[in-house]
Amino acid sequence: MSLMNTVEQIKRHEGFRRFPYYCTAGKLTIGYGRNLEDTGIDEDEAESMLAGDIENARAAVLRRINVQKCNEARLAVLVNMTFNLGVAGLLKFTRMLSAVESGDFDKAALEMLDSLWARQVPSRAQELAQQMISGEWQQ
């Protein structure tokens, strides 16, 4: 039996589950029977997932927000926030987004910091606010 046949057979037997579930052995599982408790994921898999999630966040920002006045570093702030909060969460920052769209990045940063989000993730919020103001990547 070739590897492809094995893959197709296991996929048929396991079935695909997008969200975590408990298998018949009581183990938290996802996908095609990936045992998250015993196997987890490796760093390469995590980075692949992260890349896909970042691309989805970027696409969501570009579909919903006028970023013509943003350089890449400022766009990255919006993508980072979308990754963290989801697009619905980002869209609640209406005053910040209005400031971004008008190019008032100091006001956008102030609006970012005047939020529950900034109180929940203070170091992330401070770094991203500085990046929004300066238009330069923070280290």
Image: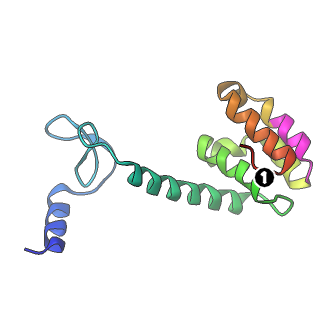
How are the colours assigned in the image? rainbow
State left or right for residue 133 relative to residue 3: right
* Image height of 111 relative to 45, above or below: above
Q: Residue at x 16, y 61 (%)?
A: 10
> Quick one: SS at disc 1?
helix
Task: Give the residue type at disc 1.
Answer: Arg
Q: Position of residue 125 (x, y in %)?
A: 72, 34
What residue occupies the far front of the structure in this picture? 139
Split into 4 quadrants, where in the image is the C terminus? Answer: top right
Residue that appears at 83% across and 36% down: 111
Q: Is residue 87 above or below residue 60?
A: above
Segment tinted magenta in the rendering: 103-111
Task: Determine the image quadrant of residue 110.
Answer: top right
The residue lying at 64 percent from left, 58 percent from top is 58
Q: Quadrant of the N terminus?
A: bottom left
Residue 124 position in % (x across, y down): 68, 35
- Toward which corner of the image does residue 66 lie, by quadrant? bottom right
Q: Is residue 24 left or right of residue 43?
A: left
Taking the view exactly as shown, the residue that stands out farthest to the left is 1
In the depicted view, which residue is nearer to us: 20 or 69?
A: 69
Q: Main secondary structure of the magenta part?
A: helix
Please count the marks in the image: 1
Q: Is residue 10 magenta?
A: no
On the image, numbered disc 1 is attached to which residue? 74
Looking at the image, residue 123 lies above or below residue 93 = above
* Residue 78 picture location, percent across and down: 72, 49
Residue closer to the observer: 51 or 110 = 51
For residue 50, side relative to residue 2 (left or right): right
The x and y percentages for residue 32 are 25, 55
Q: Residues within 10 Å of mark 1 (few under 14, many from 20)?
A: many
